[in-house]
Image (cartoon, rainbow, N blue to C red):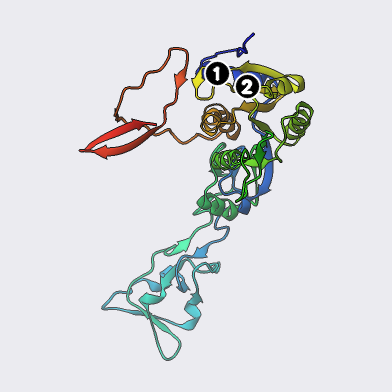
Amino acid sequence: MGFEYLTNVPLIQAREDYLALLQSHGFGPKTEIIPVFESCGGVSARAVYAHICAPHYAASAKDGVAVTAKDTVGATETTPVTLSPEQFIVLDTGDPIPEDRDAVIMVEDIVKNADGSITIHAAAAPWQHIRQIGADVCAGEMILPSHMTVSPAAIGAMIAGGVLEIEVIRKPVVGIIPTGDEIIPPCTDPKPGDILEFNGSIFSAMVRQWGAEAVVYPIVPDKFDQIKTMVAKAAEECDMVILNAGSSAGREDFSARVIRELGEVLYHGIAIKPGKPAILGCQGEKVILGVPGYPVSGIIVIEQLLKPLIDHWRQAPSAPSQYAKATLTRPVVSGLKYQEFVRVRMGCVGGRLMASPL
């Protein structure tokens, strides 16, 4: 009797059903508290409010002198006013304003005299060149809303507002398990029949681009018990697990059975090509995704099925997909059973964007 996949579920349905199953087991974002200066690129778990005002004192906005505005009344280009040393205090930008002073005159606008006095040619307005308390941030003001990516500027605003720690959505950890008797670690002198393990490097780079952490486990031979032990270990240590290869119909394709014994399999077989042998499984709230060993199939499966889970976890909008209209260089015929992903080589010919199927 020939092997038959259990399911041939449309991609959109599979994606929605998978998330619903995982959520029923408690799948979702987890948070952690980290120092603000380490939070760039993280996603805020909740709104952040300032603890203090910034500035928290009346501060000079310029290098110059602090004066009492009424002492400068009448100063013009034709009727300058001279202030004695007792009438002004030299300040640098950021210095606190003395309580008995209410204006700052820039150093460029004063003339220093030999006796220590200064001459000004324009009257100072009250609170001129003074940064008042809370000019940038007021205590209690929202600095950052929830589910926002922390930018360098946001880090500065939070520190200015006296916020030194932030609760962020913890990056999900994705464990990647390569399997296969013929798979070997990368080297420069493989023997005939050896296949260098590079899917782990591809997949780990992809999930890091999507905002997750990646752990690549040692290569596991095609032995059911060893695969099961490694998947159980990864599911305990990680939030999501990619079981690479062994999802198809070969003699030593154990992935579906391993996942079923450790947890449950929602679907084995998705109506996409390449990538049909994908296995959507879990152990409680832990994702266990069986991915074909063929690199293009694996890439498509984790793009279409794992990335939406990472986006859901991170609670941050994913980058929009980019589309382009092109003219095929030859017809592409596909069956009705699958949603096909066709790789193409693209280029402009005679001002038209052309797509050549590979």
Q: Which of 52/258 is in front?
A: 258
Question: Residue 340, position in %: x, y?
Answer: 44, 22
Which kind of residue does numbered mark 1 sit on?
A: Ile
Element under label 1? Answer: loop
Element under label 2? Answer: strand
Q: Is residue 256 above or below residue 356?
A: above
Please rate how many residues cluster around mark 2, counting C-alpha atoms within 10 Å: few if below 14, some from 14 to 19, many from 20: many
Q: Which residue is mark 2?
A: 280
Question: Residue 223, position in %: x, y?
Answer: 75, 29
Q: Quadrant of residue 221?
A: top right
Q: Is residue 298 visible?
A: yes
Question: Dots 2 and 1: beta carbons under 8 Å?
Answer: yes
Question: Residue 185, position in %: x, y?
Answer: 66, 45
Q: Residue furthest left?
A: 350
Which kind of residue does numbered mark 2 sit on?
A: Leu
Please rate how many residues cluster around mark 1, counting C-alpha atoms within 10 Å: few if below 14, some from 14 to 19, many from 20: many
On screen, residue 25 versus residue 211, left or right, reads right
Q: Which residue is mark 1?
A: 270
Q: Earlier in the sequence, mark 2 or mark 1?
A: 1
- Residue pictured at 63% horizontal, 20% vertical: 249
Q: Which of 25/139 is in front?
A: 25
Q: Residue furthest front?
A: 192
